[in-house]
Amino acid sequence: MSHVLAAPPPEAAADWTVPQHWERFTAADHARWRTLFDRQMRLLPGRAAPAFLDGLAKLDLADGVPDFRRLSERLTRLTGWQVVAVPGLVPDEIFFAHLARRRFVAGNFLRDERQMDYLEEPDVFHDVFGHVPMLAHPGFANYMQAYGEGGLRSIGFGALDKLARLYWYTVEFGLVETAEGLRIYGAGIVSSAGESRFALESPSPNRLGFDLVRVMRTRYRIDAFQQTYFVIPSFEALLAATLETDFAPLYAELAVRPDLAISAVLPEDRVFTRGTQAEAAPHAA
Ligand code: PHE
Ligand code: FE
């Protein structure tokens, strides 16, 4: 999500989509995808949420960069979603409008072999391996559509920056509590070998109970592993707290309350683990 380009590039449609040109991916691209896929599959059992692993098992992503036409056919049968290609980051309204129509926009390049561990812009591995398995989960599929509608609405309230934090701390970097312990489901975690371990095993970050307003007050950074993760009790609880809640009064409340620092821990937080790297004192920053 960004405003890098003001208008769709010449080859793109008015909604910024482009043909994926799947046939242009080389044997080396597919091999790199498989390397990334296999590496995550050694890490994710026992770490990723069952909902993510179930979705992954239904989607057939092991062999190489997926052809979005075939992937969309499969996903449409499961939850009515499609995956469409875009040239890179697209404007917020475009992104939200696609989500609201159950279209997930995916970048159309794959990281090269020097960036297997870290990249600054989401590539097709992050977008598809990271995000699409959760879109095969009916409840989460509804959450993402509603998020798109809510995103368009948030612009009218001048509250997009607040709502973006909800996406960040759930869709990208969320943890969920299960009977077996904490599990990862955020796309930014499950598509990263380093963060898949860090998010669950490092003593450094805070792991705090999810609270909707609390999350929307919390800043985030995009250039390092997270200092704070928020843990949802279940996907049902996340849906209940968001889908059926009118955010207008929350935006009004958020407008008059200070932001919270990334590392803040509040007296009312449910603390799963308090990070060794995080400062204890809450402060607005
Ligand atoms: N219900 C929210 C609103 O009133 C939108 C929303 C739905 C946000 C689902 C996130 C997830 O704007
Ligand atoms: Fe993402």
Image (cartoon, rainbow, N blue to C red):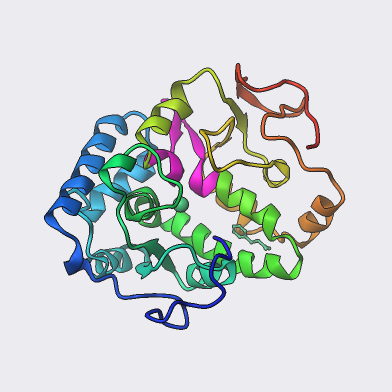
Residue situated in front as seen by the camera: 163 or 269: 163
Q: Is 124 left, or right, of 101 in this rendering? A: left
Where is residue 147 shown, x and y percent of the image? 57, 61
Q: Is residue 105 above or below residue 170?
A: below
Q: Is 149 left, or right, of 79 in this rendering? A: right
Where is residue 198 shown, x and y percent of the image? 45, 26
Q: Is residue 51 visible?
A: yes
> Which residue is pictured at 61% across the width and 49% down the height?
166
Where is residue 244 shown, x and y percent of the image? 64, 59
Q: Is residue 131 magenta?
A: no
> Which residue is pictured at 24% across the width and 31% down the height?
42
Q: Is residue 160 above or below residue 63?
A: below
Q: Is residue 268 above or below residue 217?
A: above
Q: Is 26 left, or right, of 103 in this rendering? A: left
Query: Which residue ends up furthest to the front in the rendered image?
Result: 114
Where is residue 4 shown, x and y percent of the image? 55, 65
Residue stretch rendered in magenta on the structure: 170-190
Residue situated in front as seen by the camera: 55 or 66: 66
Residue situated in front as seen by the camera: 160 or 237: 160
Q: Is residue 63 visible?
A: no
Query: Which residue ends up furthest to the right in the rendered image?
Result: 256
Quadrant of the frame with the N terminus: bottom right
